[in-house]
Image (cartoon, rainbow, N blue to C red):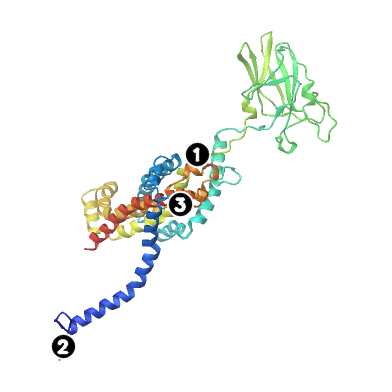
Amino acid sequence: MAVTVTKSGHAATPRRRAQRRKRNIAVVFVLPALLLLGALVVYPVLFSAGRSLFDASGDRFVGGDNYAEIFSDPATLKAIRNSTIWVVVAPVLLTGLGLVLAVLTEKVRWATAFKLVLFLPMAVSFLAAGIIFRLVYEEDPDRGVLNAVAVGVHDAFDDRSAYPTARARENQGLARDPGGTYRTADAVGSGKSISLGFVGVAPDKMPAEARPAHAASLAAAAADEVRGVVYLDFTPGGGGTPGKVDPAEKGLPGMSVEAVRDGKVAATATTAADGSFNFRGLEAGSYTVRLPAENFAAPYQGISWLGPALVTPAIIGAYLWIWTGFSMVLIAAGLAALPRDSLEAARMDGANEWQIFRKITVPLLTPVLTVVFVTLVINVMKVFDLVYIIAPGPVQEEANVLATRMWLVSFGGGNNQGLGSALSVLLLLLVVPAMIFNVRRFRRSGK
């Protein structure tokens, strides 16, 4: 048998030659991946770390000034605060939702179809999801789905004003208070009749039950009452006289009217289809006729989902829509691997489903829940697309996270790649511990 002697004087047996050949083949296959890893990951990391030590132009060495600016710039501190909210809220909600849905889908007949529907948003890009939710959160209820629902629910329990655009005709005896209430400029004595003219209501916006107000304006008041008519002081086609109820002019039904004396409401009434109202049984004296501001209140327009106060929770809601399916499927896979004999034994011992879930299912799923949670933490730290697309320009700063702040500082108008590189290094330092934890977890579970 031929034996080759190496430079070190040891005989190169066929087994050693085979091992060396395997190592060489492994290096050949791994080398392209290592080169790509170095070009796409290692080099950018090292370059960013070096660039973070220079000023915006890249010509002057500033040391740690960029890192000091991170913690002194209000906009960057706001981004750090928002990133903290994301890390605390989103992974917890997603893991909890995924766990609950994974457990519940075991109880339903169409579990596979249900999981498929929940997982479908994962097939949607963050760009498309951002555009979808930008429309969902649109403040105009005619376009935004959430506000259309909010307005519908609100109007079902609270009567909406029929005349949000109405205003009193000038110099016709009505004065407007700062709060939007209209009142008669002069006191009205009992036994008198008045006509209150309004404009600003389009003919096609008039209630269907509205009737001509001319006849009601001619009715005489009894000695113990105040009568009147509230009407639209506008004759279709023109030709009417301002301040006078013409035959073609209609009343404004459904308006609340009050008779006020000495600052107290003495009587209330609601205008009829022809706009007429009357206060009966009044004591002799003078009264101010008042039309409360509720008659002219602007319609409820819903919630400003993308305003400064709610923009971050709204974007987190969009993120939940995308990633809930991912969390549920992973936890469901872990749930399917649980030993069923433990669950059946607990049921035979008299444990209810809540006790089984809390004391058996959750502890056994802890490794899976941890992996899901840490994976989501890493993903949340890098979120960019949804924040950049959903948040409108005026509130962009209120919604910024570290990734969007880094991009805006570097390329989105700031043109300070020194500070942007410092932010990228900070983001890397925040992600690395979670990645190390996840890798160690995988290694322990593989042993």
Judging by the rendered image, the residue that carries numbered circle 1 is 308
Mark earlier in primary sequence (1, 2): 2
Can you give x and y, in whole percent of width and height, for residue 243 in the image?
79, 23
At 73% across and 36% down in the image, what residue appears? 202
Check whether the beta carbons of the residues at disc 3 and disc 1 lie within 8 A of each other: no
- Number of residues whose C-alpha sits closer than 10 Å to that of mark 2, classed few (under 14), some (14–19) or many (20 or more): few
Mark 3 vs mark 1, foreground winner is 3
At 41% across and 56% down in the image, what residue appears? 325
Splitting the image into 4 quarters, where does residue 245 fall? top right
Towards the viewer: 157 or 200:
200
Can you give x and y, in whole percent of width and height, for residue 118 in the image?
43, 56
- Looking at the image, residue 270 sits to the left or right of residue 199; the answer is left
Amino acid type, label 1: Pro
Can you give x and y, in whole percent of width and height, for residue 404 in the image?
46, 49
Mark 1: which secondary structure? loop
- Number of residues whose C-alpha sits closer than 10 Å to that of mark 1, classed few (under 14), some (14–19) or many (20 or more): some
Check whether the beta carbons of the residues at disc 1 and disc 2 lie within 8 A of each other: no
- In the depicted structure, whether residue 20 falls above or below residue 431: below
Mark earlier in primary sequence (3, 1): 1
Can you give x and y, in whole percent of width and height, for residue 431 in the image?
34, 52
- In the depicted structure, whether residue 218 falls above or below residue 103: above
Splitting the image into 4 quarters, where does residue 295 fall? top right
Judging by the rendered image, the residue that carries numbered circle 2 is 3
- In the depicted structure, whether residue 6 falls above or below residue 208: below
Mark earlier in primary sequence (3, 2): 2
Mark 1 vs mark 2, foreground winner is 2
Disc 3 to disc 1, C-alpha distance = 27 Å
Judging by the rendered image, the residue that carries numbered circle 3 is 417
